[in-house]
C-alpha cells in the first residue's frame, strides 16, 4: 500500500534518529593530518591502527590555506564513508606551513595564568605573525612553555572544510609539535641534544632540541637536499 505523507515523514525522522544514535555510540577519534597536496586519516579499530589517504583536487590548498573548501570536504567525507568510519570525531593536525612557535624563556607554567589573552604572552617576542590576527595556545615540553600560533584565517578555512563535511571538530594541533612529541616518545632515555632535520622539497628545516625543548628552528635551502643530509 502507498505510504502517506505523515508515515513517510515519521519514517525519515526515525532513520535520522537511528543514524544519529549510531554515530553517538560508534564515536571514533580520527586524526586528520593535512598538507597542500594530500589528506591522511588515522583511527583505531579493534585495537589496531588504520589509515587512509587521498590527494586534494588541483589547487585546493596553497601555503596551508584551503582554497576549494567544498571539494576538500567531499574528499574527507568520501574517505570516511569508504572506510566505514561512523561517528568520526576529528582531531585536526595543521600543516607545517600553517603555524609557528616560540620558546617562552624565563616563563613558568604558573606565570602563564597571569596573561589574560594569548597575545599578551607574546610581548617582546620576535613573532612573524600579527599577534592581533592569530589563533594561539601554549604547550609544555617538560616544564618549558612554548607558544604556538597560526593565522585565524587559516584555521577558519580548515574549520569550514570539516563543517562542510558535517563532522565535529574536537581538537586542533600543529604538525611540528605533534611530530616532536612522537620523536621524544621514541627517544625516551636519550641524554644528549637532538638535531632534527625535516625535508620539504628543496628546503630542509633544522630543529635543535635540548632537554626536550625546541631551542632553534631554521630553514636550509639547496637545489640538492641530499647535500644537506650529508652536511
Image (tube, helix red, strand yellow):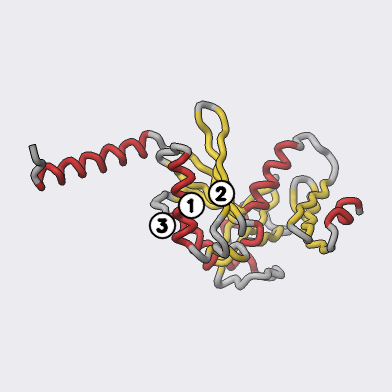
Q: Residue 101 appears in which quarter of the rendering?
A: bottom right
Q: Position of residue 185 (x, y in %)?
A: 70, 38
Return the mark for residue 197: none
Q: Is residue 29 above or below residue 210?
A: above
User: Which quarter of the figure has residue 105?
Assistant: bottom right
**Marking on residue 54:** 2
Q: Secondary structure at mark 3?
A: helix
Left or right for 121, reference 208:
left
Above or below, 189 against 178 in this view is: above
Mark in the foreground, 3 or 1: 1
Contact? badges 1 and 2 (CB < 8 Å): yes
- Whether residue 29 appears in this view of the structure is yes
Residue at image x 57%, y 45%? 53
Residue at 41% over, 49% down: 167
Residue designated by label 3: 164
Name the residue carrying label 1: 75
Q: Residues within 10 Å of mark 1 (few under 14, many from 20)?
A: many
Residue shown at the point (52%, 68%) measured from the top left: 153
Q: Position of residue 56 (x, y in %)?
A: 55, 56
User: How far, Cα to Cα, is label 1 from label 2?
Assistant: 7 Å
Of 113 and 186, which appears nearest the observer? 186
Quadrant where the N terminus lies?
Answer: top left
Examine the rendering and report whether any part of residue 118 can be seen: no
Amino acid at each position: 500500500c502507498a505510504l502517506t505523507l505523515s508515515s513517510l515523514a515519521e519514517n525519515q525522522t526515525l532513520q535520522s534518529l537511528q543514524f544519529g544514535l549510531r554515530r553517538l555510540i560508534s564515536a571514533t577519534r580520527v586524526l586528520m593530518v593535512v598538507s597542500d597536496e594530500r589528506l591522511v586519516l588515522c583511527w583505531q579499530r579493534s585495537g589496531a591502527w588504520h589509515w587512509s589517504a587521498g590527494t586534494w583536487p588541483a589547487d585546493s590548498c596553497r601555503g596551508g590555506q584551503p582554497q576549494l573548501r567544498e571539494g576538500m570536504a567531499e574528499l574527507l567525507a568520501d574517505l570516511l564513508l569508504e572506510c566505514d568510519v561512523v561517528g568520526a570525531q576529528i582531531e585536526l593536525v595543521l600543516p607545517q606551513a600553517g603555524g609557528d612557535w616560540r620558546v617562552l624563556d624565563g616563563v613558568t607554567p604558573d606565570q602563564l595564568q597571569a596573561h589574560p589573552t594569548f597575545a599578551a604572552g607574546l610581548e617582546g617576542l620576535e613573532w612573524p605573525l600579527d599577534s592581533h590576527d592569530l589563533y594561539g595556545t601554549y604547550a609544555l615540553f617538560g616544564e618549558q612553555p612554548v607558544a604556538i600560533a597560526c593565522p585565524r584565517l587559516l584555521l577558519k578555512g580548515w574549520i569550514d572544510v570539516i563543517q562542510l563535511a558535517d563532522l565535529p571538530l574536537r581538537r586542533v594541533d600543529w604538525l611540528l609539535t605533534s611530530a616532536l612529541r612522537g620523536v621524544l616518545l621514541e627517544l625516551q632515555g636519550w641524554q644528549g641534544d637532538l638535531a632534527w632535520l625535516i625535508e620539504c622539497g628543496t628546503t630542509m628545516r633544522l630543529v635543535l632540541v635540548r632537554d626536550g625543548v625546541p631551542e632553534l628552528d631554521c630553514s636550509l635551502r639547496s637545489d640538492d637536499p641530499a647535500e644537506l643530509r650529508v652536511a
